[in-house]
Amino acid sequence: MTYRTLDVRRDGHVAVIALARPRAGNAVNTTMAEEMRDACRRLYEDDAVWAVLLVAQGRRFCVGADAAEERRLLQARSPQRAEALMARLSVASSVASLDRPVVAAIQGDALGQGLELALACDIRVAAAGARFAMPQVARGVVPWDGGTQRLPRIVGQSAAQGLLLGGQTLTAREALRVGLVTQVVPAKGLADAARAVAERLAGYAPFATRYLKETVRQGQDMTLEQGLRLEADLSTLLQTTRDRAEGIRAFFEKRNPKFEGR
């Protein structure tokens, strides 16, 4: 897959998506959004991909939407047209559509839509110097790529409002404290740390990780009873897979399982 704003490759069962607009702070423009949709669709259809690693080139992870393009879109003649045009810039929804676990490696600023993109991932590993903010309301707009919904679900309403309304900028350590990121590591060790997480996830039975991700995400919008039923149903489905049988054999034989994705 060859793109202008992304670098996408697969190494074993791990697919790597790299934001490749470093001179622009990896700002999201229409081209990146369209390419992200295409890349995620292709990865979704690739059964050899068992985990995805999202990284970014340069010093910053993503500074948000491309300012010039965002300004032009927001000057559309009607709110409905503006909403339709802005939807073309969505990248978070594309990443969130992946049913494989997604790990984000955040080496620098994740601002506005850049933070929304990180929130669409399942696990976030940050460098010690990374910063996080949602400054959209100060410009008279609100987050529209999932930030108002995903952020409270991850860090809770109070901490989310500190970012959304309070204009706070969190350091990596503060982000770790509120649960926004999973791990903070020295900048030089970020690539290896995030890669290790992705490879560990890719070493699990792929149906198990997909079902687990589905259970957690869908369960957030269900009652406890409904969530427990979904958990039981997907657990039952897993009993029919070859990987489940291999996992049991490997446990009793005291060896590492060799999963095949079947």
Image (cartoon, helix red, strand yellow):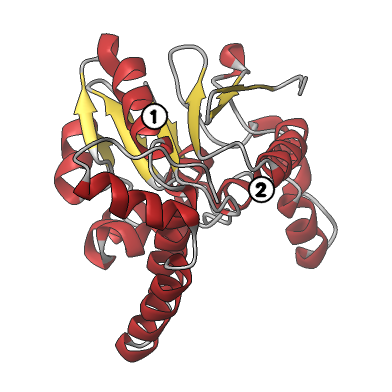
Say whether disc 2 or disc 1 marks the residue closer to the N-terminus: 2
Element under label 1?
helix
- Name the residue tied to disc 1: 199
**Amino acid at circle 2:** Ser
Q: How many marks?
A: 2
| Left/right of residue 126 with respect to residue 211 in the rendered view | left
Residue beneath disc 2: 90
In front: label 2 or label 1: 1
On screen, residue 175 versus residue 14, left or right, reads left
Amino acid at pointer 1: Glu
Which image quarter: residue 25? Answer: top right
Q: Position of residue 101 (x, y in %)?
A: 45, 46
Give the position of the N terminus as an image quadrant: top right
Q: Does 52 sit above or below residue 145? A: above
Q: Is residue 6 above or below residue 84?
A: above
Q: In what element is the residue under mark 2?
A: loop
- In front of the other: 58 or 259: 259
Q: Position of residue 17 (x, y in %)?
A: 58, 27
Above or below for 190 versus 256: above
> Where, by quadrant of the figure, is residue 10 drawn?
top right
**Viewer-side residue, 54 vs 77:** 54
Going 32% across and 32% down the picture, which residue do you hit?
197
Q: CA distance from mark 2 to mark 1?
A: 27 Å
Give the class, few, some or many, for how many residues have Cα within 10 Å of label 1's Cα (few <14, many ≥20): some
